[in-house]
Image (cartoon, helix red, strand yellow):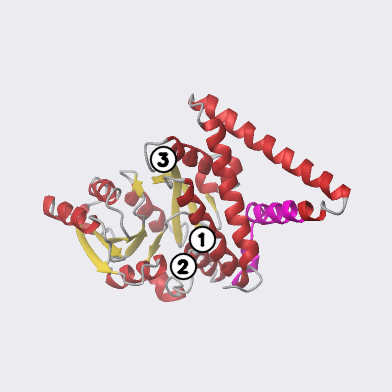
């Protein structure tokens, strides 16, 4: 039986630092390289990203690498331009901030061939995006249960059906059945696409044997912008598919609303002031416990405050953006 051809699609913009490690990891895949092609949808990068890609193409003939323009500079548009250019039987979506394990493609194809799901994916190992204490704190916070919640792709050790996976691998005919990525969403396009898979009767399979490394944001400013964007487009997503809301996603906006509400009400009403103080104290205690545990386990004192700072940034930017945008701003 002939193995299917695979198109790996990658949205990209100004990724000169990370694109070559990703390409090198794809060239080291256990899946036959002659059956693979890499389609990079570049948002007209202004850094040396394209030079890095050209250097890789000069160094080896397999796998084939093609670059398509994405003038919209939006991830769903990039994915769709790459899908349009792809020729493979299987589409594997990756990110320019990621490095897949050597058997990543092989395991994705095997899971699809076994018919376990219409979308299959695996777990992330989150690593710092730079060699700084802030980057290490952000990566640790993103992997911590308080920061990650019950997102199975960050911690599960057993295969299961889920509501989403990072990246994802699909048969080409899935896009013909339910359509491509929604270009009106500038983020959360994966969740929206996965919601359509589930609505069509499909299944999403998470296998922890499918592994990749993801490089987190490097600064608190980048992290804040990332999570505000996530929250903004999560609100848009919830307007279309309210049933996709999970408890882990409900907690940050409820906490932000409760803290702000009790704080404002506490100006005039003493019991609300007490509730505000109690909630703030319990939250601060949980954050410091997370920072202390992480700093002790990793033997890095800077994480004592760095991890709480990153978690606060994630919670308040995501939760605040959801609250701000739910009334109809997008």
Check disc 3: other Cα within 10 Å, few if <14, some if 14-19, many if 20+.
many
Q: Main secondary structure of the magenta part?
A: helix
For the residues labelled 1 and 2, say whether their Cβ atoms are less than 8 Å apart: yes
Q: Distance from label 1 to label 2 (Cα)?
A: 8 Å
Quadrant holding the N terminus: bottom left
Tell which circle, 1 or 2, labels the residue nearer the N-terminal end: 2
Range of magenta residues: 240-261
Quadrant position of residue 285: top right
Q: Is residue 279 left or right of residue 229?
A: right
Residue that badge 3 annotates: 128
Tag on residue 229?
Answer: 1
Tell which circle, 3 or 1, labels the residue nearer the N-terminal end: 3
- Horizontal and vertical percent for residue 106? 32, 50
For the point 48% across and 55% down, the residue is 226
Looking at the picture, does residue 290 appear above or below residue 100?
above
Residue 106 shown in magenta: no
For the point 54% across and 43% down, the residue is 310
Residue 260 shown in magenta: yes
Q: Distance from label 3 to label 1 (Cα)?
A: 20 Å
Q: Residue furthest front?
A: 267
Residue that badge 2 annotates: 186
Looking at the picture, does residue 1 appear above or below residue 76?
above
């Amino acid at each position: 039986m002939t193995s299917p051809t695979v198109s790996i699609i990658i949205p990209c913009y100004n990724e000169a630092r990370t694109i070559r490690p990703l390409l090198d990891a794809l060239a080291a895949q256990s899946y036959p390289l002659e059956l693979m092609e890499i389609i990079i949808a570049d948002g007209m990068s202004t850094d040396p990203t394209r030079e890095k890609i050209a250097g890789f193409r000069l160094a080896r003939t397999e796998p084939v690498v093609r670059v398509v323009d994405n003038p919209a500079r939006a991830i769903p548009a990039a994915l769709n331009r790459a899908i349009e250019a792809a020729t493979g039987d299987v589409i594997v979506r990756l990110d320019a901030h990621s490095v897949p394990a050597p058997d990543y493609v092989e395991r994705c194809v095997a899971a699809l061939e076994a018919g376990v799901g219409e979308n299959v994916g695996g777990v992330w190992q989150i690593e710092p995006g730079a060699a700084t204490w802030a980057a290490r704190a952000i990566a640790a916070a993103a992997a911590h249960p308080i920061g990650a919640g019950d997102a199975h792709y960050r911690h599960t050790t057993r295969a299961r059906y889920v509501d989403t996976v990072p990246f994802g691998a699909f048969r080409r005919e899935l896009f013909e059945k339910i359509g491509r990525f929604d270009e009106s969403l500038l983020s959360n396009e994966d969740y929206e696409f996965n919601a359509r898979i589930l609505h069509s009767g499909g299944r999403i399979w998470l296998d922890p044997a499918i592994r990749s490394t993801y490089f987190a944001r490097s600064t608190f400013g980048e992290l804040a912008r990332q999570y505000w964007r996530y929250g903004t487009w999560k609100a848009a997503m919830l307007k279309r598919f309210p049933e996709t809301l999970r408890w882990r996603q409900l907690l940050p906006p409820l906490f932000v609303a409760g803290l702000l509400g009790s704080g404002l009400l506490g100006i005039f009403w003493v019991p609300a002031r007490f509730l505000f103080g109690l909630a703030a104290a319990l939250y601060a205690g949980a954050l410091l416990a997370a920072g202390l545990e992480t700093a002790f386990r990793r033997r890095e004192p800077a994480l004592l405050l760095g991890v709480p700072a990153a978690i606060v940034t994630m919670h308040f930017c995501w939760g605040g953006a959801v609250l701000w945008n739910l009334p109809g701003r997008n």
